[in-house]
Image (cartoon, helix red, strand yellow):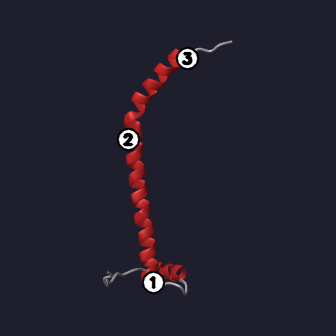
Amino acid sequence: MKQKTSITLSSDVLKQIDRLAGSELSRSGAIEAVLRAYFRQKERQRLNQRDLELINAAADSLNAEAADVLEYQSIDD
């Protein structure tokens, strides 16, 4: 369901929106497409940040385990 709203934009932003929309999209369609892409990007960034925090939280344990495994390996000449 779509709702009508009113926003005020500078003329240079409107020109860019019109260029982006071309003849295929309305201004509303172009703005909606840009906002949806922005929201997807922000969600990806949030998930990537969460994953990085999980990796960092486990890093010390994983590094200790890897060091332990390396102690049992020997290099044969």
Label 2 crowd bin: few (<14), some (14–19), many (20+), radius 10 Å:
few
- Could you tell me if the residues under marks 2 and 3 are in contact, i.e. CB atoms within 8 Å? no
Badge 2 marks a residue whose secondary structure is: helix
Position of the C terminus by quadrant: top right
Q: Is residue 73 above or below residue 37?
A: above
Task: Say the numbered circle drawn on residue 73.
Answer: 3
Badge 1 marks a residue whose secondary structure is: helix
Label 3 crowd bin: few (<14), some (14–19), many (20+), radius 10 Å:
few
Which residue is labeled 1 in the image?
Answer: 27
Q: Earlier in the sequence, mark 2 or mark 3?
A: 2
Residue found 43% across the figure and 77% down from its top: 31
Q: Is residue 4 above or below residue 49?
A: below
Q: Position of residue 28 (x, y in %)?
A: 42, 82
Q: Amino acid at mark 3?
A: Gln
**Mark 3 to mark 1: distance in Å?**
64 Å
Which residue is labeled 2 in the image?
Answer: 54
Q: Is residue 38 above or below residue 66?
A: below
**Mark 2 to mark 1: distance in Å?**
41 Å
Q: Amino acid at mark 2?
A: Leu
